[in-house]
Amino acid sequence: MIMVENLSVHYPDTKVEALTNINVSFNKGDFVCVLGKSGAGKSTFIRCINGLQKPTGGEIYIDDQRVSTLKEEQLRKVRREMGMVFQHFSLIPRLSVQQNILTGTFGYRSSFKNMIGYFTANELELAKRVISSVGLTEMANRRVEYLSGGQKQRVGIARALMQQPKILLGDEPVASLDPGTSNHIFTLLKEMHERLKLLTIINVHDVDLAKRYATRIIAFKNGHLIYDGSPEDFNDKEYYETYESEQQNSFFSM
Ligand SMILES: Nc1ncnc2c1ncn2[C@@H]1O[C@H](COP(=O)(O)OP(=O)(O)OP(=O)(O)O)[C@@H](O)[C@H]1O
Ligand SMILES: [Mg+2]
């Protein structure tokens, strides 16, 4: 479903080689957790997949389509099929739960329709179903600014599902939430993954969550892919390799 071939990303501003020659592919049904220390390249990787970051080397194929050669219209179609969930939710605080979720349809609509806020009966019906599936029916008309973090992330997930995606991507979607709420959000993500037969790829800092929910773990270190395998095989050795520092902390020895 997604094939990544020799993917490299070099940021000229910081002269950082954020990703180096990454080769990996994902299939429908994979629930992938992406691990790695801060700066390892996780966000860069997710951004390359959803087209927000242009690779400086290599290729990404989505459903056998070579992304770099797609025309604008085809690219929009590919992007529409990828829902994205963010750490800080990226919602519009003054709009209601339902209005925020309906913005998930924008990729399917003309800008004129977006401007006048016109939604079809089908879109409203889909929004209702999606709101119910994330357990927010009672709060559909409440302004998002009055919700808790966990409820906001439910809205974030629902908005992604409004796109009727084939692929669901997440960049640390639970990093701002407490452990109990993080578990609830992962349970919801897994449930949607199974019900809608999605390919799900999520960056996460919490190894326990990854081991509990993922069907597959990949890990980056300094822009290199250092692990691609089952959650069961990601143990102490792999943990150490992923998170150890190359440099000793010199702060206290100064
Ligand atoms: N837009 C950018 N311009 C320049 N350098 C960048 C940019 N984004 C990231 N980098 C650099 O690329 C490297 C990888 O960053 P990335 O954000 O992908 O890491 P990450 O694994 O997501 O880290 P974190 O866990 O802190 O979110 C880092 O060294 C970072 O400083
Ligand atoms: Mg990141």
Image: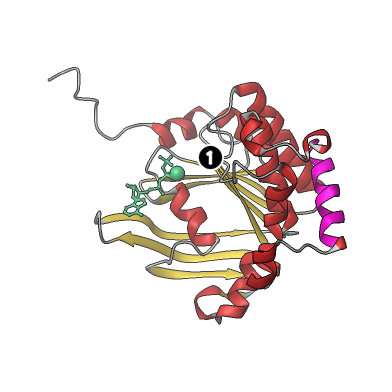
Q: Magenta segment: does it hold 92? A: no
**Looking at the image, which is closer to me, 153 or 225?**
153
Q: Which residue does the image show at 58% across and 42% down from the upper left?
A: 89
Q: Which residue does the image show at 50% across and 27% down from the upper left?
A: 236
Left or right, 54 with reference to 1: left
**Farthest residue, direction left:** 254
Q: Residues within 10 Å of mark 1 (few under 14, many from 20)?
A: some
Examine the residues drawn in magenta and state their main secondary structure. helix
Report the residue marked by disc 1.
88
Part of the protein shown in magenta: 122-135
Left or right, 197 with reference to 239: right
**Looking at the image, which is closer to me, 119 or 14?**
119
Residue 212 visible in the displayed image: no
Q: Residue 58, how many percent across, how many down? A: 44, 70
Q: Residue 104, how many percent across, how many down? A: 68, 56
**Looking at the image, which is closer to me, 181 or 106?**
106
Toward which corner of the image does residue 26 lie, by quadrant? bottom right
Number of numbered markers: 1
Residue type, label 1: His
Q: Which residue does the image show at 19% across and 17% down from the upper left?
A: 252
